[in-house]
Amino acid sequence: MTSHRTATEAQPIPSIHFNLDELGARISQWYDSHQRELPWRRKWRETQDPYVVWVSEIMLQQTVIKAVIPAYARFLETFPNVQSLAAASEEEVRLASRGLGYYRRFNFLHRAAQVLTQASNIIDWPTSYKDWLKLPGVGQYTAAAIASICFEEPVAVVDGNVERVFCRLFDIQEEPNQPRLKKAFFEIGNKAIAKQPPGSFNQGIMELGQTHCSKGQTECQHCPLSSLCLANKRGTQKLAPKLKKRQAPIEVSMEVIIPINKENKIGLEERPKNAKFLGGTWGFPTKLVNVDGEKSWDGTRPSSFESHQNERIGAIKHSITKHKIQSDVYVSKRYRNKTIKWFDQGSVEENLVSNLDRKALRKYQNSAILN
């Protein structure tokens, strides 16, 4: 398969070769007939509460739907409304969002909930795209999604799925997340959404990118936009958009230490705020190992603690953002610090925020120490 474009310079965005009202209508009609039944959509229909949409949009950032579904149910069970979220502690919010990674987004969600509830228990919800942007952690995509779904404001979302759909519609064989392309797609989307139910259009174009126009494969024969799509006509779906350049991962060596006391309980501690990884979360004590094999605690330690020789039980692998972590796992029966909390073996996992710690715990549970 060859490309129809040979220029090495950035391709100009082509003239719009179809009616934008028709584009909007096709997407909205397709979504109304083919939308998946997802928990946050059902919750919105039942409650008409912007909170349940907001939580889902935060969770879905850089996280696959399969991982979000159980976490979403757990989060809403813990914090059923914005008032309960605002009243929670940071640690309670971390535990409710455990396993999803990118925990900073939940810190912002927590802070924004506190902003909304600081004046009264009766929430005066922002109703516009511009007002949602004023809340901590709410960017253009999230603001557009909530404003369109909950308040029917015709403002278009632009995420990775939308970028991919538009790149194929116009056969743009470039990396899609460029500022000039984002701006162009936002303008096109705003024109296409103008005469449509905005929630249906925005959810429809994102769902199209998740399903029929996905990164791995295309199902053009079932796509409502196939007759409008230049990449489909030219057979260049695998070239548009161009794959983003992947940064080489940063290799990290680490040690995770699992404290055990005389009652066979497992110890967790709050990681220092200045830790390089997972700062402020409760988990297992962690050391970093440099290229020379020298070891140091990740973050500033308490003024008094004890750490003695530990028993290695295996190794785990984990990734945090661009870091590729290789960690040895140790058990220590004499590790102590003044802030450590002890948990029965059966209740440890529910108090772990990070999957790094969960992997270490499973390594311990499967080790010869317990057999």
Image (tube, rainbow, N blue to C red):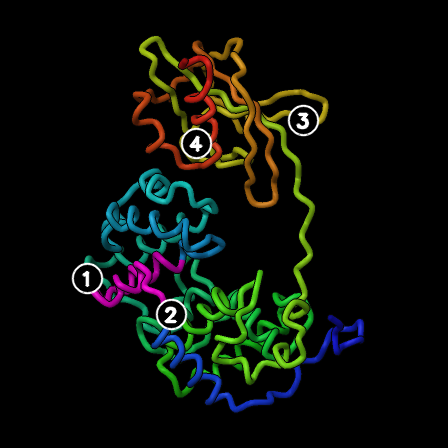
Which residue is identified by label 3? 290
Instruction: Identify the mark nearer the N-term, 2 or 3.
Output: 2
Q: Is residue 317 above or below residue 40?
A: above
Nearest-to-viewer mark from 4 and 3: 4
Mark 4 belongs to which amino acid? Arg
Rendered image quadrant of residue 344 = top left
Dot 3 crowding, Cα within 10 Å, few <14, some 14–19, many 20+: few
Instruction: Identify the mark nearer the N-term, 2 or 4.
Output: 2
Image spot of residue 74 (x, y percent): 29, 46
Instruction: Identify the mark nearer the N-term, 4 or 3.
Output: 3
Q: Write the start and end of the magenta stretch as one range.
A: 36-57
Q: Is residue 28 magenta?
A: no
Q: Residue drawn 65% across and 70% down?
A: 240
Image spot of residue 177 (x, y percent): 61, 65
Q: Confirm or deny contact between disc 1 and disc 3 (CB under 8 A).
A: no
Nearest-to-viewer mark from 1 and 3: 3
Q: Confirm or deny contact between disc 1 and disc 2 (CB under 8 A).
A: no
The answer to which of 88 and 286 lies nearer the viewer is 286
Nearest-to-viewer mark from 2 and 3: 3
Q: Is residue 274 above or below residue 209?
A: above
Instruction: Identify the mark nearer the N-term, 1 or 4.
Output: 1
Residue 42 located left or right of residue 277: left
Residues under labels 4 and 3: Cα distance?
24 Å
Q: Residue drawn 58% across and 72% down?
A: 182
Mark 1 belongs to which amino acid? Ile
Dot 4 crowding, Cα within 10 Å, few <14, some 14–19, many 20+: some
